[in-house]
Amino acid sequence: MNKSILFLLMTPVLWIAACSFKAPEVSVTGEMTALEREVLGTYRQIEEDTWMVASTRSEGKSETQQISPEKKRVLEAMQDQKFNKDDIDEFKRKGYVGENNQGFLSIRDHEDLKEDASASEFVKKVVNEENSAREIIMNRVIQLNDALKNAVRENVMTIFAQMNQENSPAGTWIQEKMGDWVKK
């Protein structure tokens, strides 16, 4: 089959697949700052790019399409996040972990984890994987956007923290700006 015909046939399929992915919901009170718009816009672009790569690879084009090592790391990080999502949601519901104010998960002091060493190790393993994935994605967002390269990293991390906290289910632990932990 001619490559241009195949491209024309696959474009709507890939477009629909990319559109079916739900981007994180972020509801910021008031106007979004320019920094927030830059971070969220770049994050969504990375999501779209990785979905396009994943969709194209799933169609059997992996031999012909080359991706950069940086894009591959982000793709793997997002796949790790999807893989660990159910465990993380369970840890949040049980109160084992919470969303800190820097964009990462923090393990909470919980009696169940003190009594069960294997459960504690499993939580640590999954939280470390998630935080590593978040770090890779955050670094890529900063790397791809010139406006963010000059931003204060802590401000970018705060935006990621807001995004993660807003996407966290009600009743889970989140850390406020001043460091206090509260249930959402």
Image (cartoon, rainbow, N blue to C red):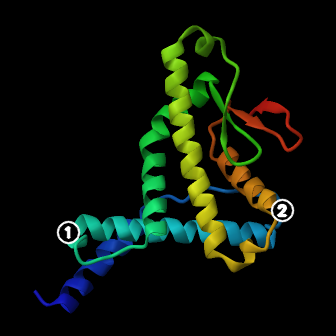
- Residue 99 % position (x, y): 69, 39
* Mark 1: few/some/many CA within 10 Å (<14, 14-19, 20+): few
Kindly identify the amino acid type of the residue bearing the numbered disc 1: Gly
- Residue 142 % position (x, y): 66, 68
**Circle 2 SS class:** loop
Examine the rendering and report whether any part of residue 107 can be seen.
Answer: yes
* Mark 2: few/some/many CA within 10 Å (<14, 14-19, 20+): few
Residue in front for this viewpoint, 29 or 37: 37
How many labels sit on residues? 2
**Circle 1 SS class:** helix
- Residue 131 % position (x, y): 59, 44
Q: Residue at x 74, y 36 (%)?
A: 174
Kindly identify the amino acid type of the residue bearing the numbered disc 2: Gly
Q: Identify the residue under disc 2.
A: 30
- Residue 160 % position (x, y): 69, 55
Q: Left or right? Give the position of 68 relative to 23.
A: left
Q: Identify the residue under disc 1.
A: 60
| Residue extending farthest top | 115
Vertically, is 57 above or below 96?
below
Q: Quadrant of residue 43?
A: bottom right
Q: Left or right? Give the position of 144 relative to 78.
A: right
- Gap in angstroms between the C-alphas marked 1 and 2: 45 Å
Vertically, is 108 above or below 162?
above
Vertically, is 128 above or below 149?
above
Q: Quadrant of the N terminus?
A: bottom left
